[in-house]
Amino acid sequence: MKRRLTREGSEKTSHDIEALDRTISDLGSELDCATQIIVVKDNNLERLNKEKEKLQPAYNQVKQRMRQIGATLGRERV
């Protein structure tokens, strides 16, 4: 088994180094996957935000109309 000294002076076997390389590679793959998920979620949020912007004027009109009706009903009760 090959051995080499690290900066700290302790020995690392080639098996240890290969295991670390695999771990680093796995972490890189996980990071790539997480990045893809973030991009998809960001795109979804952008799409939903555009839909919300389209609906906002209608929502504001309905809200204003409800207030008018509420005010009218409040005056009639007096």
Image (spheres, rainbow, N blue to C red):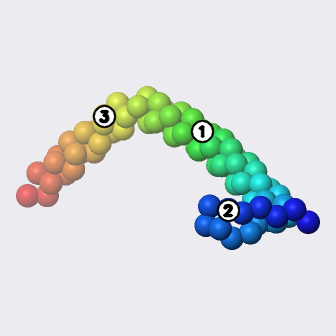
Q: Which disc is residue 73 wearing?
A: none
Q: Which disc is residue 39 wearing?
A: 1
**In the depicted structure, whether residue 47 falls above or below residue 37:** above
Residue in the foreground of this view, choosing between 41 and 49: 41
The disc labelled 1 sits on which kind of residue? Val
Which of the 4 image quarters holds residue 12? bottom right
Structural distance between the alpha carbons of marks 2 and 1: 39 Å
Mark 3 and mark 2 residues within 8 Å of each other at the beta carbon: no
Q: Quadrant of the N terminus?
A: bottom right
Residue receiving disc 2: 6
Q: Position of residue 25 (x, y in %)?
A: 76, 51
Residue at image location 16% in from the left, 48% down from the top: 71
**In the depicted structure, whether residue 60 falls above or below residue 1:** above
Q: Position of residue 38 (x, y in %)?
A: 59, 44
| 10 Å crowding of disc 3: few (<14), some (14-19), many (20+) | few
Residue receiving disc 3: 61
Residue at image location 60% in from the left, 38% down from the top: 39
Per the image, label 3 sits on a secondary structure element best described as helix
Residue in the foreground of this view, choosing between 42 and 17: 17
The disc labelled 2 sits on which kind of residue? Thr
Structural distance between the alpha carbons of marks 1 and 3: 34 Å
Q: Position of residue 3 (x, y in %)?
A: 82, 64
- Left or right of residue 42, residue 62 in this image: left
Residue that lies at the very extreme toward the left in this rendered image: 78
Residue in the foreground of this view, choosing between 53 and 69: 53
